[in-house]
Image: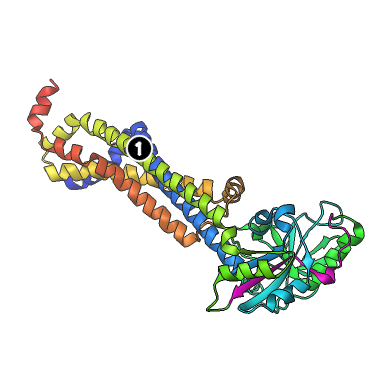
Amino acid sequence: MKEKIFSFLPFWNMMRRGNRSFALAGLVALLAFTAFAGTIIVTGLQNGMDSLEKRLGADIMVIPENATMDSDLESIILQGNTGYFYMGSEKLDEVASLEGIGEISQQLFLASANAGCCSMQVQIMGFDPQTDFTISPWVKDSYDGVIQEGDVIMGCNLMGDVGEIVRFYDVKCRVVAKLAKTGTGYDNAVFANEDTLKQLIQASVEKGLNTFGKVDPSAVISCILLNVKSGYEIDDMVNTINVRIDGVKAIRTTNLTTGISSSLSGIAYIMQFMISVVWSMLFFVLMLSFTLMVSERKKEFAILRAMGVSRNGLVLTVLKEILLIGLAGGVIGVVLGFIVIVPFGGMMEEKIGLPLLLPRAGKMIFSGGASIILSSFAGTISSLLTVCRISRIDSSLILREEH
């Protein structure tokens, strides 16, 4: 019976000293929140970067020479902001004729207008399903049908359900699919085949709602994406295109992401440093708090020893109480992390200006569980030495000190 009573003692102590237990659980919650939120954000940024590189999916991008001056290329390609630039479609044949060119395809860009003729203002990207090797593999994950003229595929962040009719420059388009989240600007873009894009460009020209003037949609493209054959150097091919073909600028796609990679590395380093600092401070405060908690209960522990509780039994009883407080705080911290990060991930992505793709539910749950365990044991370990020291003190001396 006595053993059964002692087994419930950690719970009773927690309830009897509710304010103190809540305060200690709050400190552990901060540990768990810091560990969980920091891990998820850093992982999400890395996932977003990996997704971005995968979506670009080409060795080289060829654009009009004036695009680097007249348009913010990175904002269009990487962040999905609205914009457009054009060059003659004959440039595709000129690039394709070069020795060492492997896969090659073209894309068309168009920005919808902020006017009544358009359902929304977005970046619209046209591709050729027959030759495309960057967008098509991603599209097939969500839609395995044939993309007809007038069909559009929406990024996951855009309004519009499958089967819904949307308008761009008063041209009616049917939504046939919504794409899976990538954590990149593509989540805010609309995709269609080239025939649809040419129709939309022509409609925008007729309405005079764009600034590119009179453009023949059948004779222009926005960019060329290509892979270099095995045995050829990418940088050499970039130089060859820039020297031999007038009016274009060849860019190695990895160079587009260099700035983002640098920003990502800097943010990750800062976050890891801050997490280490916060953890060190909180661990010290926890150690001090649990030490004070244990020290002020010397009389209580002495009474338990006098009642026949062994040293090991006393240590286990106190550690169980501390572990329960740690588990409660860990759960609270991780739950708060979920509440803050999951609903507001898109807002954080917009504020930091970097692709953010949160891990899948399974990985988030694993990270949450690991954070709970880590923070719980941090509190337990921080008090272990004090508990062991108190348990070795002669109980009769402690009781005489109280009189």
Residue 208 placed where, x, y %? Answer: 90, 56
Quarter of image, res 251: bottom right
Q: Is residue 95 left or right of residue 295?
A: right
* Of 23 and 353, the residue lying toward us: 353
Membership of 357 in magenta stretch: no
At 91% from the left and 58% from the top, the residue drawn is 207
Residue 227 left/right relative to 336: right
Q: Quadrant of residue 187?
A: bottom right
Q: Is residue 90 above or below residue 397?
A: below
Membership of 222 in magenta stretch: yes
Q: Outermost residue toward the front?
A: 243
Residue at the location (57% across, 59% down)? 255
Residue 356 seen in render: no
Q: Which residue is located at x 50 percent, y 61 percent?
A: 360
> What span is colored magenta in the figure?
211-228
At which x and y percent is residue 384?
Answer: 21, 42
Image x and y of residue 227, in percent? 60, 74
What's the coloring here? rainbow
Q: Quadrant of the C terminus?
A: top left
Q: Secondary structure at mark 1?
A: helix
- In the picture, residue 315 is in which quadrant? top left
Give the crowd class for mark 1: few <14, some 14-19, many >=20 residues within 10 Å. some
User: Which x, y percent locates residue 15?
Assistant: 33, 37
Amino acid type, label 1: Leu
Q: Please, is residue 343 above or below residue 314 in the view?
A: below
384 over 167 or under it: above or below: above
- The residue singled out by tag 1 in the image is 282
- Label total for image: 1
Give 14 or 158, whichever is nearer the viewer.
158
Of 32 and 136, the residue lying toward us = 136
In the picture, measured across the screen, residue 183 lies left or right of residue 198, that is left
The residue positioned farthest toward the right in the image shown:
206
